[in-house]
């Protein structure tokens, strides 16, 4: 299934120390994001999902609502919608909107326990951990909105994967994706060995302990194929408008409305990342 990513803001209220985003200032008008969304509606064939991305997309909540409602009122709605967010911006209004629009989900970035999360900070340098955990609890307790968690790993926190996942599970956060910093921090064989060992330990926990049968780790459930190429769409000024995961042809990426760049270069880092993901996927799914 194709995923179309819609950028709604490049601004952010955090200053994460491993942030890969070079553009931290671009703003998007309501017209820009709606035109891009309409182009997706007009060209997409088959089932697809939509992801809202930044910067911090929740800074432009109005854009998200406008695009979501455009899709849902069209003849070609998405199968689902995800807001990929740092989890620091939540309100009663947002909680109620999510309750009433269950196709709209939140994927919140938190890198495990407080130590593992030490590079995810506000602009004043304060760790975001306490705020994000409190917001997750607020959404779950008052609105029964269960966010998924995106857990980014790097050389300073990779050894905390297992403990962090156990902690997040204890707080009711049971759907977790474990990512890797790919461009702004180095990874090496030691990192890869620790990553694999930690996730094998999590796999064993799920397989042998009834308490953790409800723990969903995306790396255990799906292995991204090497043929899945991310494509970036930019406007005439060079500003990134959106992305796709490059599974289909003859969609918005084949039109002349936007400039398209395919990220299909194979590097030693991309090979290392694929290999560790493949290793843990095969381990978990072996008999």
Image (cartoon, rainbow, N blue to C red):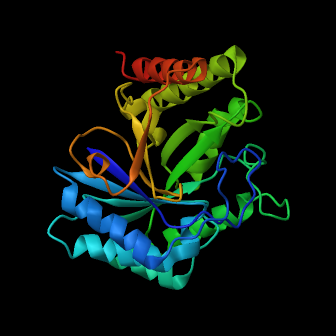
**Image position of 2 (left or right of 124):** left
Q: Nearer the viewer, residue 120 or 233?
A: 233
Pinpoint residue 153: horizontal percent, then vertical percent. Answer: 65, 36
User: Can you tell which quarter of the image residue 52 is in?
Assistant: bottom left
How many numbered circles are shown? Answer: 0
**Image position of 42 (left or right of 233):** left
Whether 124 is drawn above or below 100: the answer is above
User: Which residue occupies 78% across, 45% down?
Assistant: 115
Pinpoint residue 51: horizontal percent, then vertical percent. Answer: 41, 57
Whether 222 is drawn above or below 46: the answer is above
Does any portion of residue 88 appear in the rendered image? yes
User: Which residue occupies 77% across, 57% down?
Assistant: 121
The quarter of the picture where the C terminus appears is top left
Whether 67 is drawn above or below 152: the answer is below
Q: Nearer the viewer, residue 189 or 22?
A: 22
Pinpoint residue 224: horizontal percent, then vertical percent. Answer: 39, 31
Does any portion of residue 103 appear in the rendered image? no
Pinpoint residue 132: horizontal percent, then vertical percent. Answer: 65, 63
Q: Nearer the viewer, residue 215 or 267?
A: 267
User: Which residue occupies 63% across, 20% down?
Assistant: 192
């Amino acid at each position: 299934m194709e995923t179309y990513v819609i950028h709604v803001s490049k601004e952010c209220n955090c200053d994460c120390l491993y942030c890969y985003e070079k553009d931290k200032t671009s703003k998007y008008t309501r017209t820009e994001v709606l035109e891009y969304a309409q182009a997706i509606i007009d060209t997409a064939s088959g089932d697809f999902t939509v992801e809202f991305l930044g910067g911090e997309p929740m800074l432009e909540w109005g854009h998200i609502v406008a695009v979501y409602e455009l899709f849902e009122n069209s003849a070609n709605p998405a199968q689902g919608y995800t807001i990929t967010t740092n989890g620091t911006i939540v309100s009663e209004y947002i909680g109620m909107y999510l309750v009433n629009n269950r196709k709209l989900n939140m994927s919140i970035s938190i890198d495990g326990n407080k130590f593992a999360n030490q590079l995810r900070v506000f602009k004043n340098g304060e760790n975001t951990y306490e705020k994000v955990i409190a917001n997750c609890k607020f959404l779950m307790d008052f609105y029964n909105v269960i966010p998924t968690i995106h857990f980014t790993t790097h050389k300073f926190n990779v050894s905390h994967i297992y403990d962090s996942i156990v902690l997040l599970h204890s707080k009711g956060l049971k759907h977790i994706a474990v990512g890797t910093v790919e461009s702004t921090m180095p990874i090496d064989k030691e990192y890869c060995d620790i990553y694999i060992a930690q996730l094998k330990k999590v796999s064993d926990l799920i397989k042998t302990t009834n308490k953790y049968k409800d723990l969903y780790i995306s790396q255990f459930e799906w292995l991204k194929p090497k043929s899945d190429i991310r494509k970036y769409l930019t406007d005439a000024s060079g500003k990134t408008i959106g992305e796709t995961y490059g599974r289909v042809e003859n969609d918005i990426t084949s039109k002349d409305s936007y400039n398209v760049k395919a990220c299909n270069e194979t590097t030693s880092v991309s090979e290392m990342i694929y290999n560790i993901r493949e290793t843990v996927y095969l381990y978990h799914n072996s008999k």
